[in-house]
Image (cartoon, rainbow, N blue to C red):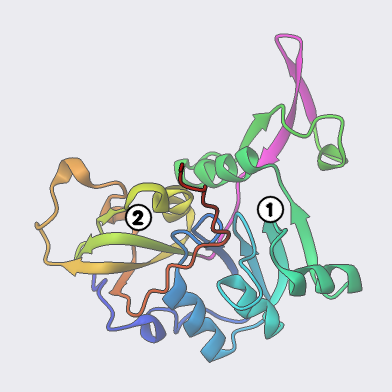
């Protein structure tokens, strides 16, 4: 199976209008920057995006929101995007907010081939309306279904021609569980190496989960909110 593609445009070429996408990252850390820019360039629309957050106005998923390419956003945190807020309040964008742990575990369940999970998060809140509740050891749990994503777009530090991936520090975040869960997983990496170059003990995502891989370019690696402390006198 040929997995290596020349660039993001080639790798995302088969993503159709109306697709369900998972996008790795946390805030602006570890997001598939090149894939997002390629989707913006292509103009793919009516997308359902599953991501921890929705980027900011001029970066990440925010670029797709600005072009009205996203029909529905499934996320945990969306507080840094004014355009997202405007579309939500105007009714232009469908939004499903999910507790962060539930979001991660529903991704993991999809990767493991599990149809659903039970979680205590959301019991007694709007999150639980209309969902099955079961009691285990005197504690109520919600039934949450595993996600079904047509494509997972992830970003890694290093990868090889087999699709094996290594993430760097906190940029790992949601990428491994989403890489497992997509029907087709597209990985962009900062450094693409020949097969056999990676130490097997250092691989975070085995290549069996990855269908397409390419070496990305021009990573901005923005910091969503820079917080520093004053140096002592």
Which image quarter: residue 22?
bottom right
Q: Is residue 149 above or below residue 32?
A: above
Residue under the point 59% across and 84% down: 44
Q: CA distance from mark 2 to mark 1?
A: 27 Å
Residue under the point 16% across and 45% down: 200
Residue under the point 39% across and 63% down: 155
Residue 6 percent location from the top left of the image: 27, 83
In the image: residue 37, left or right of residue 51: left
Label 1 Cα neighbours within 10 Å, binned few <14 / some 14-19 / many ≥20: some
In the image: residue 124, left or right of residue 222: right
Residue 69 percent location from the top left of the image: 67, 81
In the image: residue 2, left or right of residue 89: left
Q: Which mark is residue 209?
A: 2
| Outermost residue toward the front in this view | 233
Q: Is residue 53 above or below residue 232?
A: below
Tell whether position 137 is magenta: yes
Residue 52 percent location from the top left of the image: 60, 54
Residue 203 percent location from the top left of the image: 24, 47
Q: Is residue 121 above or below residue 175?
A: above
Q: Nearer the viewer, residue 183 or 107?
A: 107
Reading the image, the residue beneath label 1 is 77
The magenta region covers 133-151
Which image quarter: residue 214?
bottom left
């Amino acid at each position: 199976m040929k997995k290596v593609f020349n660039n993001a445009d080639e790798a995302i070429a088969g993503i159709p209008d109306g697709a369900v996408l998972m996008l790795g990252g946390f805030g602006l850390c570890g997001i598939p920057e090149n894939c997002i820019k390629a989707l913006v360039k292509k103009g793919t629309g009516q997308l359902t995006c599953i991501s921890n957050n929705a980027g900011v106005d001029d970066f990440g998923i925010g670029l797709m929101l600005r072009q009205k390419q996203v029909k529905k956003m499934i996320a945990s945190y969306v507080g840094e995007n004014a355009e997202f807020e405007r579309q939500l309040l105007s009714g232009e964008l469908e939004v499903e907010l999910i507790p962060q742990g539930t979001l991660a575990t529903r991704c993991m369940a999809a990767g493991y081939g599990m149809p659903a999970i039970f979680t205590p998060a959301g019991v007694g809140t709007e999150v639980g309306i209309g969902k099955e509740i079961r009691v285990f050891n005197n504690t109520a749990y919600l039934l949450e279904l595993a996600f079904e994503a047509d494509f997972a777009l992830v970003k890694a530090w290093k990868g090889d021609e087999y699709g094996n991936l290594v993430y760097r520090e906190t940029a790992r975040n949601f990428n491994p569980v989403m890489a497992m869960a997509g029907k087709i997983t597209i990985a962009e990496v900062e450094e693409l190496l020949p097969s056999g170059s990676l130490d097997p003990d250092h691989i975070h995502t085995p290549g069996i989960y990855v269908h397409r891989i390419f070496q990305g370019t021009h990573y901005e690696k923005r910091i969503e909110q820079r917080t520093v402390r004053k140096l002592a006198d």
